[in-house]
């Protein structure tokens, strides 16, 4: 999905996120549908990288993401929140950590975000 609809950076970040979740014990992937986890992971990475902001490239509506995976918006939101809570992912934590940010955007956002220099 990331290669077709987004770009290789998103694909890499989503694979890394899936690996981070798989290292959790017990692994959360055991329960739930694969498409729900995949949608939640892409949404989480998109959330941190402002995928849903029209001024960004690439850009996608959250509803398009749900439609592509065939997942309801409430299900996607719940799974994404579960992922963010498990890995403590927020906009500002991601800026400091840079694990979940795309390359150039991460540097640009860090430079313009006073919260990220602490």
Image (cartoon, rainbow, N blue to C red):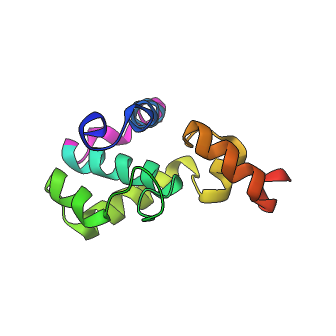
- Residue 102 location (% of width, % of height): 54, 40
Is 51 positioned to the left or the right of 93 in the image?
A: left
The question of residue 95 being in magenta is answered with: no
In the rendering, at what x and y percent does residue 74 appear?
27, 70
Residue extending farthest right: 118
The image position of residue 27, as x and y in percent, is: 39, 36
Q: What residue appears at the point 42 percent right and 65 percent down from the top-left corner?
A: 54
The residue positioned 59% from the left and 36% from the top of the image is 103
Q: Is residue 21 left or right of residue 4?
A: right
Q: Does the magenta stretch include residue 23?
A: yes
- Dividing the picture into quadrants, the one containing residue 75 is bottom left
Q: Is residue 6 visible?
A: yes
List the single residue furthest toward the left: 70
Q: Looking at this view, is 68 or 35 the one in front?
A: 68
Q: In this view, does 86 lie above or below 26?
A: below
Residue at the spot 51% in from the left edge and 52% down from the top edge? 49
Considering depth in this image, is 83 or 25 the residue closer to the camera?
A: 83
Name the quadrant of the N terminus. top left
Across and down, in percent, residue 72 comes to: 19, 65
* Residue 38 position by quadrant: top left
Is residue 69 found left or right of 53 in the rendered image? left
At horizontal 47% and vertical 29% (from top left) the residue drawn is 23
The correct choice, above or below, for 81 with respect to 13 in the image is below
Residue 22 in the image: above or below residue 101: above
Residue range (magenta) = 21-34
């Amino acid at each position: 999905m990331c290669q077709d609809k987004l770009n290789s950076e998103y694909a890499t970040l989503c694979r890394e996120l899936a690996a981070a979740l798989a290292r959790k014990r017990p692994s959360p992937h055991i329960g739930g549908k694969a498409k729900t986890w995949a949608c939640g992971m892409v949404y989480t990475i998109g959330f941190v990288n402002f995928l849903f902001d029209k001024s960004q490239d690439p850009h996608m509506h959250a509803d398009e993401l749900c439609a592509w995976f065939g997942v309801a918006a409430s299900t996607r939101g719940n799974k994404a929140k579960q992922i963010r809570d498990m890995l403590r992912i927020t906009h500002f934590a991601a800026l400091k950590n840079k694990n979940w940010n795309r390359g150039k955007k991460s540097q640009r956002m860090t430079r313009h975000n006073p919260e990220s220099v602490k």
